[in-house]
Every structure is written in structure tokens, then in C-alpha cells.
Image: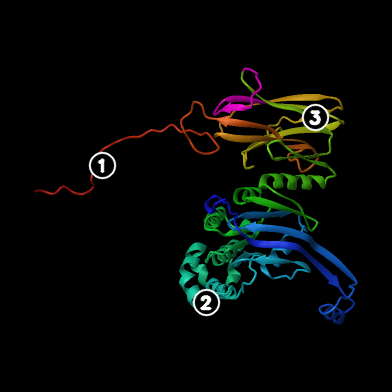
């Protein structure tokens, strides 16, 4: 095969192999010091992470998700070198920039400008490099005169602005972010995500820990789910986030089922099983079942629910997602004030939800939830992802971009501009 026919995979900028972290307790400090040189049996040990393996390729964005205590922050601290692994190794290629715990490394008595100099110096940059970037850092942070005031008077959002600005002043090969962006205002979050995407286009790899489903699905190429210190799943962001939500539901002693679909996606189901979806289908106005929908077409989502136990109330909800798992629209019968009460085992209910499919062309899925109260996180009878998949096509409407059809009525008036300058005599 000739060289121009060979597909070369992007090289891994980050390699994690057999990684583990344990905290050990010894009889005394002398025994701890002795353990540095020869094996010493500790009184007890607690493993935070064990057998972690993954790569991050150049330009790839990977999300790390998991419940509190899963080991996410410990993993990032080992990758950045602030913690030493107990076993395994980490190999990085290129400079790593990290935004971990908010304010880490900042001195509250120093000004924002002084903290930038200090932090950038610790990152290995020279005074000349820092001076050349200072104006850009100050402009990107957009905190005005506070840049020259002590950081102890900053809000958490202002600290995050400075931390992100200095961490990304010079494009790193690997950028690591641990929940820090969640404290910022919406404007700065958009601004930060734009910079991250631009870095990705230039080859920077991203490792991000976040509970923000939208951030993980919009930024990341894949996601890794940690559970009790181990990698539980590594895959597409939308599949991993669905699995993660199912794990949260499992805390309520719900059953969780993971089913591979023919499309290559993963269907996640969870719930106590006291009610279940018996059938779901999409119909045109004439009643025919359809899986291809024209933009703006009137459709009916038909859901049949079977009741397997006496229930005080039932709420049925649905959520539309695009092909990458971004939520387009969702509601439930709690919010529409249509809760069914006092249901008996053996009953069946059929819901008909009619709406105009004002969606952009592409593939969409329907997630369904059966529960009580306003959210499926409490009393979850059943949650089903990818319960139905349908395709949107544009057969009659004018061309448009995006996931929603909100075509405007456009008017334009033409007129001769009237000059405000006084007339001059010739």
C-alpha cells in the first residue's frame, strides 16, 4: 500500500495504563517511610482507583463522568502530577494545562495580575512570555479594574475567569478541566467553549469532568464512566450519559438493563417495573404509523402503558433528542396537569400526544419515562432511552439550518437615506 493510501490514526497525547491509587495507613510514620524502600504491610488500605486504562488521541475530547466518590478528581490530579499513582503509569506527550479545584494555586492577598504572573511562572513560562500574553489574559478574563485588586474580593465566577484565561493563554497539547466552568456565567461559558473548540481544531486534546450532560455531549467525542474507582464503560457521550442516569436511578433499587441496538447505539432501561411501556409508535394525521416525518408535519406520539401494581399516581413523560443526544424538547403529564391517580394492577392506558414536528432534518430519538411526582429521579417505574427513532426530512419548506423550524415572516422596506448635513450653496 502506498503512503498516500495509508490511514494514520492520530497519535495518543495521553496514555493511562493499569493506573491505581490507594491510601494506606501504617502503625507510625517510621513504617510509612520504610515503605518507600521496601514492602511494608499497612494496617489498612483504601483503593480510590484501580486498573484504569485509556488513551486520548491528538485533538480528541474525552469526558469523565461518574457519581460522587467514583474517583474522577483523583484521576485528574494524577494525570497533572499533583498526586502520585500507587500502581501503573501515565505518559503524556506535550504540555498539560489544567483547571482543577477553583482557586488552586491562587493567593487571595495577591491581585489577579500578580496571581497570573505566579501561576504562569509555575507552569514554566518565562517573564518575557508572560508579559507578552498579559494583555490578552486580562482582555479575555473581562473583570475590569478587579484585575489589579486582591483576589480575596473576587467572586467564584471571577476567579474562574482568571484561572481559565491563564490556563489557556498558551495553547496546550492537553487541556484538563474539572467542573470549574460550571461556576461561570452563561456568557463566559460560551466564550470558554469557543476557545476550547478552537484549540481542538489546532490539535489540543481535552479531558473534562462535568455533571453537565449538555457540555459532555457537545464538546466530547467519547466519554468514560467511572464507578467505584473502575472504568465501567467507555463509549459515545450520549450512550454513557444515559448509562450514568440509569446508575443514579439504580440507587432507588431500580433494575438497569443495557441493550445494544442494531444502529450501534445502546438502549438503557431502568426502573422498579411497577409500570412499563407496552408499545410506542409515531403516527400521521390519517392514523398510519410512520418513521419518516416532513418538517412541520402534524404527528401523534402514541404510548401504551401497562400497570403491574397498584399505584397512587402515574406521570408519563417524553423527551426528543437529536442524533448526538442533545435534548430538543421534553415534557410530562405532571407539567400539563394530567396526572392519572389510583391505578390498579392489570390496567392499561393509551396516551396520544399530538404536536407539529417543527424540527430540522436529521435523526431523532424519543426517550420515555413513567414515574410519580414531577421527576423520574423519584419513584421511577420505567425509563427507556431510544424507545423510538424517526427521521426528519424537508420536502416542502425553504432551506434552513439547525434543529428547529422557526421560519420567520421577513419584511424589508427600502427608502432613500436623508442626509443630516446642511445643504451648501454652490
Nearer the observer, disc 2 or disc 3? 2
Along the viewing direction, whichever of 144 and 394 lies nearer the viewer: 394
Mark 1 and mark 2 lie on one chain; the one further toward the N terminus is 2
Q: Decide whether residue 37 is among the magenta residues.
A: no
Front residue of 85/317: it is: 85
Q: How far apart are marks 3 and 1 (CA)?
A: 66 Å
* Residue at the disc numbered 2: 126
Label 3 belongs to which residue?
341
Closer to the camera in the image, 351 or 127: 127
Mark sitting on residue 417:
1
Residue 249, percent across and down? 79, 45
Q: Residues within 10 Å of mark 3 (few under 14, many from 20)?
A: few
Which mark is in front, 1 or 2? 2
What segment is highlighted magenta in the picture?
A: 286-301
Residue at x 73%, y 62% (from the top left corner)? 17
Mark 1 or mark 3, which is nearer the start of the sequence? 3
Few, some or many residues within 10 Å of mark 1 (<14, 14–19, 20+): few
Q: Do the residues labelled 1 and 2 touch (CB within 8 Å)?
A: no
Can see residue 131?
yes
- Left-right relation of 298 to 68: left
Q: Is mark 2 on a helix, strand or loop?
A: loop
* Residue 355 visible, this angle: no
Amino acid at each position: 500500500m502506498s503512503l498516500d493510501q495509508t490511514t494514520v490514526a492520530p497519535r495518543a497525547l495521553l496514555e493511562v495504563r493499569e493506573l491505581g491509587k490507594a491510601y494506606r495507613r501504617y502503625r507510625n510514620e517510621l513504617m510509612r517511610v520504610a515503605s518507600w524502600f521496601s514492602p511494608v504491610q499497612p494496617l489498612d488500605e483504601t483503593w480510590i482507583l484501580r486498573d484504569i486504562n485509556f488513551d486520548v488521541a491528538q485533538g480528541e475530547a474525552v469526558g469523565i463522568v461518574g457519581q460522587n466518590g467514583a474517583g474522577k478528581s483523583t484521576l485528574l490530579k494524577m494525570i497533572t502530577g499533583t498526586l502520585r499513582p500507587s500502581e501503573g503509569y501515565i505518559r503524556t506527550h506535550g504540555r498539560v494545562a489544567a483547571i482543577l479545584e477553583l482557586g488552586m494555586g491562587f493567593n487571595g492577598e495577591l491581585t489577579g495580575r500578580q496571581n497570573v504572573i505566579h501561576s504562569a511562572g509555575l507552569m514554566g513560562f518565562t517573564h518575557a512570555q508572560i508579559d507578552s500574553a498579559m494583555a490578552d489574559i486580562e482582555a479575555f478574563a473581562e473583570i475590569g479594574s478587579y484585575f489589579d485588586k486582591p483576589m480575596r474580593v473576587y467572586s467564584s465566577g471571577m476567579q474562574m475567569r482568571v484561572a481559565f484565561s491563564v490556563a489557556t493563554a498558551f495553547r496546550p497539547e492537553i487541556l484538563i478541566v474539572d467542573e470549574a466552568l460550571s461556576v461561570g456565567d452563561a456568557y463566559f461559558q460560551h466564550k470558554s467553549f469557543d476557545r476550547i473548540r478552537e484549540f481542538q481544531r489546532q490539535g489540543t486534546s481535552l479531558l473534562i469532568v462535568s455533571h453537565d450532560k449538555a457540555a459532555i455531549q457537545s464538546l466530547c467525542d467519547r466519554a468514560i464512566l467511572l464507578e467505584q474507582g473502575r472504568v465501567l464503560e467507555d463509549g459515545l457521550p450520549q450512550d454513557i450519559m444515559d448509562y450514568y442516569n440509569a446508575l443514579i436511578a439504580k440507587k432507588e433499587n431500580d433494575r438497569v438493563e443495557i441493550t445494544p441496538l442494531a444502529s450501534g447505539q445502546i438502549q438503557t432501561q431502568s426502573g422498579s417495573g411497577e409500570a412499563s411501556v407496552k408499545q410506542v409508535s409515531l403516527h400521521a394525521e390519517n392514523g398510519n404509523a410512520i418513521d419518516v416525518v416532513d418538517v412541520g408535519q402534524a404527528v401523534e406520539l402514541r404510548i401504551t402503558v401497562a400497570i403491574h401494581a397498584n399505584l397512587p399516581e402515574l406521570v408519563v413523560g417524553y423527551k426528543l433528542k437529536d442524533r448526538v443526544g442533545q435534548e430538543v424538547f421534553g415534557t410530562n403529564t405532571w407539567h400539563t396537569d394530567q396526572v392519572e391517580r389510583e391505578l390498579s394492577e392489570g390496567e392499561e392506558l393509551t396516551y396520544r400526544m399530538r404536536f407539529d414536528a417543527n424540527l430540522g432534518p436529521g435523526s431523532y430519538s424519543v426517550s420515555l419515562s413513567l414515574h410519580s411526582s414531577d421527576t423520574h429521579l423519584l419513584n421511577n417505574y420505567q425509563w427507556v432511552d431510544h424507545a423510538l427513532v424517526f427521521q426528519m426530512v424537508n420536502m416542502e419548506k425553504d432551506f434552513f439550518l439547525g434543529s428547529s423550524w422557526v421560519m420567520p415572516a421577513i419584511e424589508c422596506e427600502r427608502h432613500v437615506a436623508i442626509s443630516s448635513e446642511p445643504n451648501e450653496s454652490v
